[in-house]
């Protein structure tokens, strides 16, 4: 709804919650008085600095947060909690597939991280060497990340669902000579051979790769050109490695994401700004307290897991849940059972999952005592009002605030959300920007549009969690950070409307990027894989609305004139996408077409294909070189 819901239909935060919240109305009132960027000091104050920072932001005002500061992210996430006598508190609860569980106290985590850090050093990893981590949701994943952070080696985690080719591209791009992976993992009860994928990736990169293998399947791993994770940790047990003091602006990690080009975009995050941002938003948005148990259901291979499974909750000293399985295995009440058994207080998931839970029915959450929950979060795509209400009612028992959090890989942490102890919640809207963040909705020239009108969402001031590339470059990954008149403005690529109350309503992407079941994909990347198939002349990929996934991938493919668009070709296309990117990117629908709608200059008009895939009205198509194709495609889809 463009102008938002009437205020009497908004939901107020529960009074009990407000009374105990980390951020109250009084704090929120004080932020504007502190001025920008001074209000970000509260974020930096949540961390322990080896050398205090000289200023909140450098003189240039855009390039470096907390200049002069030095710190170590792993010591902030582990050591200081042990030093504060919280070593016996639980840091990680791992819920494995096959009903295994494992917990690590902060003291145990400290021991594991130190031992693996020592092992990495022995393997030759030095400060600033990039270590690639290609692991499913096992405890060795956060342990390896923290071990890297401890010795100042940026990690580059590659989602385990990506293919060997995708892994190879990311290892080459990051010039990484170290890989931590595993033999395999279980997905829906079947063991997948990850080592084989990793071996293939290592064969296709130029550099030689030192490999560490986690034994996840508990089978013997044939001896080979690798080191066993468990042996390394056992050999270095008890070794302590002094955390390397990092400059605030030194890299903590690299992460690849889908951009608007055919190649994945490399995003680099810094140690100080990023960590301050995720610690602060865990505290302010998720209201996380050290005694809380937080479960962020995203895979750690994505930014959401980096920020709110690993660095955010551990920097606060809370307990984080790492879940390996799927939500419906062995039964559709699995998540609720995990929440019940572990007394989870904060649960963070994506609307695509909530819509699946809704479809399965409320009897599954109803089977469990979910009263430990005190806050719910949503991320990844717009959450419609019905889904929001269901989540609040059936998961939150009507008692928990629901925060709809908007952010991106590039922003590092949440930038738009309500503050749960302060702001009213408007189901279907993300709320305003957080204190210290400034957002605007602009037209094609970068000028603000009136409330109620659609435009592109831009952030008009820097924030600590922003990617380093964003500070350094004015034009990066298809995103600009300068307007024509020189003002700083980050183009997010998202469409939005601001309502009369200042709340933002997100409307999906304005570019060629889309989110399918929480995975960020680029149509250009998928198209490059499809046109690589012999017999394919052209391809265009668009997102189609899907009631559960949010978006489904729809490919329009035009075969060469003597080639049939048949099941065999479809099969080859699917295999090509799976091998270039991974199963997550395989089109849900492939429509073979004699040609694609084009402008007179020969550019494929995706906008029309998107409308056709979504069964929408196309409006005037007379500017096309081949308007007749539109009707042909529509009738092809009707068949
Ligand atoms: O389109 C927006 C959508 O997810 C994109 C960012 O994807 P990624 O970098 O993979 O990060 C995912 C999680 C942080 C955004 O450009 N998005 C994320 N959160 C929301 C959202 N769309 C609407 N509402 C949200 N709360």
Image: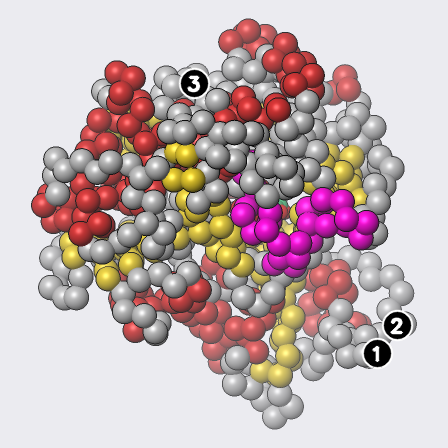
User: Residue 43, image x and y in percent?
Assistant: 52, 25
Q: Residues within 10 Å of mark 2 (few under 14, many from 20)?
A: few
User: From what the image shows, is residue 388 above or below residue 591?
Assistant: above
- The magenta stretch is 464-491
The span from disc 3 to disc 1 (Cα, nearest Å) is 59 Å
Residue placed under numbered mark 1 in the picture: 600
Picture quadrant where residue 152 is located:
top left
Respond yes or no on whether mark 1 lies under 8 Å from ligand 1.
Answer: no
> Which residue is found at the position 54% from the left and 47% from the top?
468
Label 3: element kind: loop
Residue 349 included in the magenta stretch of the image: no
User: From what the image shows, is residue 425 above or below residue 278?
Assistant: above
Q: Pointer 1 and pointer 2: residues touching (CB < 8 Å)?
A: yes
Instruction: Left or right? Give the position of 377 relative to 113.
Output: right
Q: Pointer 2 and pointer 3: residues touching (CB < 8 Å)?
A: no
Q: Which mark is residue 623?
A: 2
Which corner quadrant holds the N terminus? top right
> Which residue is found at the position 80% from the left and 53% from the top?
484
Q: Which mark is residue 461?
A: none
User: From what the image shows, is residue 594 above or below residue 45?
Assistant: below
The span from disc 1 to disc 2 (Cα, nearest Å) is 7 Å
Residue placed under numbered mark 3 in the picture: 289
- Disc 2 or 3, which lies upstream in sequence? 3
Q: Residues within 10 Å of mark 1 (few under 14, many from 20)?
A: few
Label 2: element kind: loop
> Which residue is found at the position 29% from the left and 17% from the top?
84
Q: Is residue 513 visible?
A: no
Q: Secondary structure of the magenta portion, mostly?
A: loop
Give 261 or 431, whichever is nearer the viewer: 261
Q: Is residue 143 visible?
A: yes
- Disc 3 or 1, which lies upstream in sequence? 3
């Amino acid at each position: 709804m463009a102008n938002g819901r009437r205020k009497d239909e908004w939901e107020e935060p529960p009074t009990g919650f407000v009374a105990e919240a980390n951020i109250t109305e009084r704090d929120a009132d004080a932020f504007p008085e502190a001025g920008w960027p001074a209000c970000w000091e509260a974020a930096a104050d949540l961390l322990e600095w080896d050398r205090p920072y000289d200023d909140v932001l450098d003189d240039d005002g855009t390039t470096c947060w907390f200049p002069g500061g030095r710190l170590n992210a792993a010591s902030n996430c582990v050591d200081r909690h042990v030093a504060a006598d919280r070593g016996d508190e639980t840091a990680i609860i791992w819920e494995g597939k096959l009903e295994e569980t494992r917990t690590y106290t902060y003291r145990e985590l400290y021991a594991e991280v130190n031992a693996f850090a020592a092992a990495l050093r022995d393997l030759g990893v030095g400060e600033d060497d990039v270590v690639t981590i290609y692991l499913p949701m096992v405890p060795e994943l956060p342990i390896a990340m923290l071990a890297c952070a401890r010795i100042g080696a940026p990690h580059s985690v590659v989602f385990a669902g990506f293919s060997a080719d995708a892994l190879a591209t990311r290892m080459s791009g990051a010039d990484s000579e170290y890989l931590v992976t595993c033999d395999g993992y279980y997905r829906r009860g079947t063991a997948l051979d990850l080592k084989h994928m990793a071996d293939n990736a290592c064969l296709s990169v130029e550099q030689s790769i030192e490999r560490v293998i986690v034994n996840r399947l508990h089978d013997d791993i044939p001896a080979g050109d690798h080191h066993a994770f468990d042996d390394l940790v056992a050999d270095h047990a008890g070794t302590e490695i002094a955390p390397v003091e990092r400059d605030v602006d030194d890299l903590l990690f690299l992460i690849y994401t889908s951009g608007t080009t055919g190649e994945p975009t490399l995003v680099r995050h810094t140690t100080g700004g990023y960590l301050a941002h995720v610690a602060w938003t865990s505290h302010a948005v998720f209201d996380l307290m050290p005694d809380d148990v937080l479960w962020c259901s995203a895979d750690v291979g994505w930014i959401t897991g980096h920020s709110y499974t690993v660095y955010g909750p551990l920097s606060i000293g809370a307990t984080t849940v790492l879940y390996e399985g799927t939500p419906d295995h062995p039964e559709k009440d699995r998540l609720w059972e995990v929440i019940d058994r572990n007394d989870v207080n904060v649960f963070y998931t994506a609307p695509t999952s909530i819509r699946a839970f809704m479809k399965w029915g409320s009897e599954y959450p109803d089977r469990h005592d979910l009263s430990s929950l005190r806050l719910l979060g949503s991320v990844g795509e717009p959450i419609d009002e019905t889904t929001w209400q269901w989540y609040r009612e059936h998961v939150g028992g009507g008692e928990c605030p629901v925060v709809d959090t908007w952010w991106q890989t590039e922003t590092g942490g949440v930038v738009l959300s309500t503050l749960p102890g302060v702001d009213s919640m408007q189901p279907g809207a993300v709320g305003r920007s957080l204190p210290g963040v400034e957002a605007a909705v602009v037209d094609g020239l970068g000028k603000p549009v009136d409330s109620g009108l659609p435009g592109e969402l831009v952030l008009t001031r820097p924030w600590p969690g922003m990617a380093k590339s964003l500070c350094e470059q004015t034009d990066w990954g298809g995103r600009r950070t300068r307007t024509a008149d020189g003002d700083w403005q980050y183009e997010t690529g998202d469409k939005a409307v601001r309502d009369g109350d200042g709340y933002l309503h997100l409307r999906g992407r304005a570019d060629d990027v889309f989110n399918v079941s929480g995975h960020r994909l680029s149509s250009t990347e998928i198209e490059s894989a499809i046109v690589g198939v012999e017999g394919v002349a052209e391809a265009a990929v668009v997102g189609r609305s899907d009631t559960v996934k949010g978006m489904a991938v729809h490919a329009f493919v035009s075969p060469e004139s003597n080639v049939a668009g048949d099941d065999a070709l479809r099969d080859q296309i699917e295999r090509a996408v799976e091998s270039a990117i991974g199963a997550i990117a395989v089109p849900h629908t492939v429509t073979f077409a004699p040609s694609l709608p084009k402008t007179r200059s020969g550019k494929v008009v995706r906008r029309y294909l998107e409308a056709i895939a979504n069964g929408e009205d196309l409006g005037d198509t007379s500017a096309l070189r081949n308007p007749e194709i539109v009707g042909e495609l529509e009738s092809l889809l009707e068949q």
